[in-house]
Amino acid sequence: MKLPKSSFSSIAEEAKLCLILNNRLYTVEVREEKGNNFFYFANKKYLLQESESLKSIERIYLKNNEIEFKSIINNISKKSLKEDNNLLKKDIFELQKKYELLDFIVNKVFPLYSKNKNNIKLKSKNQKPNQKLEEILKPKIDKHRTENLKDGFECLLNRDYSILEKNIIKNINLLIFNRNIYITKKIPEKIYKTIRNRFRINNINYSYKFTGYLKDLEKEYLKNLSDEITKFSNHSGNLLNEKINLLNKKNNFSEIVKKQIYQEGRIGFIKKGQDHYIFLEQEPFALKSIDQSDYYVFEKCKVGVKLKLNNHKIELESPVVINKYSHPLLSGFDMPEQYICTGNGISSNVINDFNEKKDYAGIAYYLLKVGGFALRNGYCPGMNPHHHLNRNTFCNNLTTLQEINKRGVVVEKQ
């Protein structure tokens, strides 16, 4: 595999003169300046600038080239998966996102609906999972192998060591000068002046000995990094393969992933393109005009919250009506995915409380309930809706109290 040039090598080339001391990089300023650390070399005094640790430099290198590394890891991971599973031929990262989003929806949010059907005040502790849905997305995985499925890039990025430290430098101090590499060691004052290849950092004396070239160190580093990438790629690919095979044996997870919509009672999820929504279906309801005696019926709709996955953290948007719909609290008419005007219905204190507990399922269900409540009860005296409920704007929704009673539709209080 071809990897991008390392940040360490780029820094060493640009600085021309630098040192690695105790797994930390130091660069030498080309002109003499005031400071605390000085480098005495070839009868000149230079300011020694402390840079990042080798681990930090490697992490920056990986982050700066994240797209390239993810592409490499993705290709390796797919090769380690079984070729007879059509689902596994898809992009490995997209597959993991789908799994994590569905796991969040089905095993964390759905149980809240079962527990709190008629209660908007949610409690996140000790929720019993929906047993039917739990069977879909809960395989038995050896917990000693992994607590959470993480992609190869995340494993690579969050190691507690760097390749340079562990495999190459191994706690040896180096001097890098004009792309040549020298091993250094401390020497006593009495022999300092008798040695030609010498330098001093403040009051500490060193000798140095040629050991190789920067280009060779870079080559060795990239080879070791390639091996590390392959290891993590195969690891994450094999774990995902095991997890999905277990799911397929139990409940045909492949078919669940392929579904565009899945619903249990009133709660479900729907996929629109690359977007995932969790939704609560609202039964038909009626509203009475505030300043007249007219009644307007609103048919069933899906109040949804869009989900995004960012570094394994669920991000949630404000509630919308997913299907085409018209309502005083929506900005348009007969349009899909419109945000619901909830006024002051969404409490920042409630959201903050859930955030502190990292209870993102609680936030999702809370937003669904607030969105549905706003549609049914939010149009009331004193508020400023997008559209007023009258015959000019909602003539298609106009009905009679007799028809409402005949259908058994609830007239919401305002």
Image (cartoon, rainbow, N blue to C red):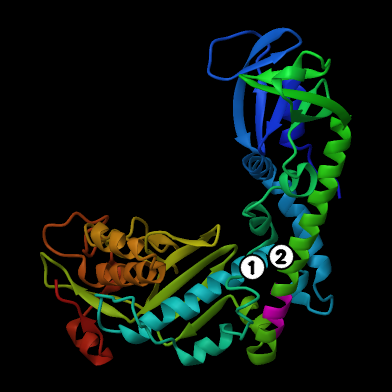
Question: Between 356 and 245, which is closer to the camera in this rendering?
Answer: 356
Name the disc covering residue 92, or none: 2
Q: Are marks 2 and 1 in contact (CB under 8 Å)?
A: yes
Residue type highlighted by circle 2: Ile
Identify the secondary structure beneath mark 2.
Answer: helix
Q: Is residue 234 rendered magenta in the image?
A: no
Q: Quadrant of residue 329?
A: bottom left
Label 1 belongs to which residue?
96
Does residue 354 lie above or below 25 as drawn? below
Pointer 1 local density, CA inside 10 Å: few below 14, some 14–19, many at least 20: some
Q: Is residue 242 rendered magenta in the image?
A: yes
Is 388 displayed left or right of 323 in the figure? left
Which residues are drawn in magenta? Answer: 240-245
Q: Is residue 344 visible?
A: yes
Name the disc covering residue 217, or none: none
Identify the secondary structure beneath mark 1.
Answer: helix
